[in-house]
Image (spheres, helix red, strand yellow):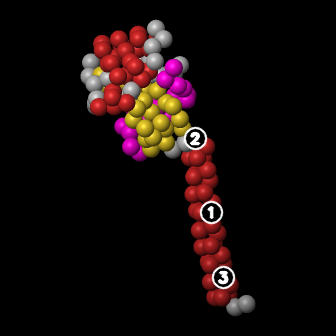
Amino acid sequence: MPPKKALKVNSKIEKDLKETNARDSNEQLLKTENKTGISVKVRHILCFKLSKCLKAIEELKSGSRFDDVAAYYSEDKSRRGGGNLGWMTNGSMVRSFKDAAFNLSISTVNKPVYTDPPVRTKYGYHVIMVEGKR
């Protein structure tokens, strides 16, 4: 094979290898995201004042159900649904809320695992619990 043709073949092979490696890397990234979850089913209690949020946490510590405490203490419209925000994706939450939500274990409203201390965001103070991950 003449040298020019060999160079073209080699560069074509290198290009194909780079594309294959990039595709494999993307597939591996997707597999990793699926294992760690890219969305969470979240409930929260949002309070504008830290003191009110701490009272909500005391209620939870005394054994109250998360949805009941959220309905009483939360200061946003999710209170009507017991603080249920539904399924939220990784990119739909502010950073501190997302970090807390993805680090919590899955629990139920009867025996919630929640953030203590509350998580502060630009919206106020949140007590967060997670009901599912996918």
34 relative position to 87: left or right: right
Residue 9, quarter of the rendered image:
bottom right
Q: Are marks 1 and 2 in contact (CB under 8 Å)?
A: no
Q: Establish if 33 lies above or below 13.
A: above
Residue 6, quarter of the rendered image:
bottom right
Q: Which residues are magenta?
A: 91-110
Task: Give the x, y percent position of residue 42.
Answer: 45, 33
Which of the marked residues, 2 or 3, is nearer the chain's N terminus? 3
Residue 105 within the segment the image draws in magenta: yes
Res. 119 visible in picture? no
Q: Which residue does the image show at 56% across and 46% down from the upper left?
A: 33
Q: Nearer the viewer, residue 12 or 75?
A: 75
Is disc 3 surrounded by few (<14), some (14 to 19) or many (20+) residues within 10 Å?
Answer: few
Q: Which residue does the image show at 62% across and 63% down from the upper left?
A: 21
Could you tell me which quadrant the N terminus lies in? bottom right
The Cα atoms of the two marked residues, 1 and 2, are separated by 23 Å
Amino acid under disc 2: Thr
Q: Which residue is mark 1?
A: 21
Q: Which residue is mark 3?
A: 9
Mark 2 or mark 3, whichever is nearer to me: 2
Mark 1 or mark 2, whichever is nearer to me: 2
Residue 2, quarter of the rendered image:
bottom right
Amino acid under disc 1: Asn
Q: Which residue is mark 2?
A: 36
Q: Establish if 5 lies above or below 67.
A: below
